[in-house]
Amino acid sequence: MHQGRNPAPNGENRNARSDGGLELEAPHEGTVQRTGAAEPASAHSNHAAKHGGLFFMAPDGWHHIEGVVTAEREFHLYFYNNLTKSISAQPFLEGTFIEIVKLDSEKKEMGRPVKVTFAKAEEHFLLASLPEGYPFPFEINARIKFEDHEKPVLFNFVFEHAAPGDLSKK
């Protein structure tokens, strides 16, 4: 199971934390709750992971991202629009990077984070090769440079295993 690192400030069970963009652990039937309010189901409220990873809505309320660790020890960072349709990852390559952090069995950080840059942009995702010596579980802090933000926006991912099957290749 993948999980987010930080709970929502109001105590709701959220799947992960980003600077300003919190999402529920799993979409609820017919509604998505944000800051305690319910919204009608729509294409925008579909926040289900598409490649077996962790899914976030960005603070701008338009972009969506998904982080996936593959069996080949690669981190794929997928990008989607406001209707969760895949978009080009190329505009995000410059200024975006990750830090990987070792975690103990209780998911407490061990040692210092190691910065990893993305090797390339595929059509809909950025690809980074993960360094050796990071057994599961581990944390990836993705710092994504969005056009409308001066600094990269932080998204925290905790992975307990690789994505199932070949979902990340689709």
Image: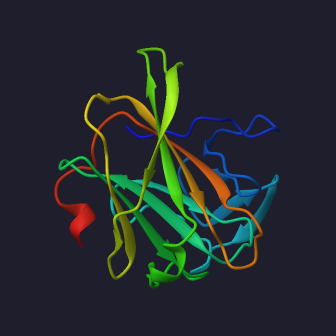
Query: Vertically, is 74 above or below 62?
Result: above
Percent x, y for residue 74?
A: 28, 53
Task: Determine whether, in the image, residue 92 is placed left or right of residue 69.
Answer: right
Q: Quadrant of the C terminus?
A: bottom left
Query: Vertically, is 40 above or below 114?
Result: below
Q: What residue is rendered at 32% in x and 77% in y?
A: 122
Percent x, y for residue 79?
A: 48, 73
Quarter occupied by residue 10: top right
Task: Determine whether, in the image, residue 170 is placed left or right of residue 21.
Answer: left
Query: Vertically, is 92 above or below 108?
Result: below
Percent x, y for residue 143?
A: 59, 56
Q: Quadrant of the N terminus?
A: top left
- Is the image coloured rainbow, by chain, by secondary structure, or in one colour? rainbow
Q: What residue is rendered at 74% in x and 72% in y?
A: 60
The answer to whether residue 24 shows anywhere in this view is no
Query: Vertically, is 84 above or below 104?
Result: below
Q: What residue is rendered at 43% in x and 61% in y?
A: 49
- So how many labels did they put on this image? 0
For this rendering, which residue is in front, 133 or 27?
133
Q: What residue is rendered at 68% in x and 35% in y?
A: 7
Percent x, y for residue 54?
A: 46, 52
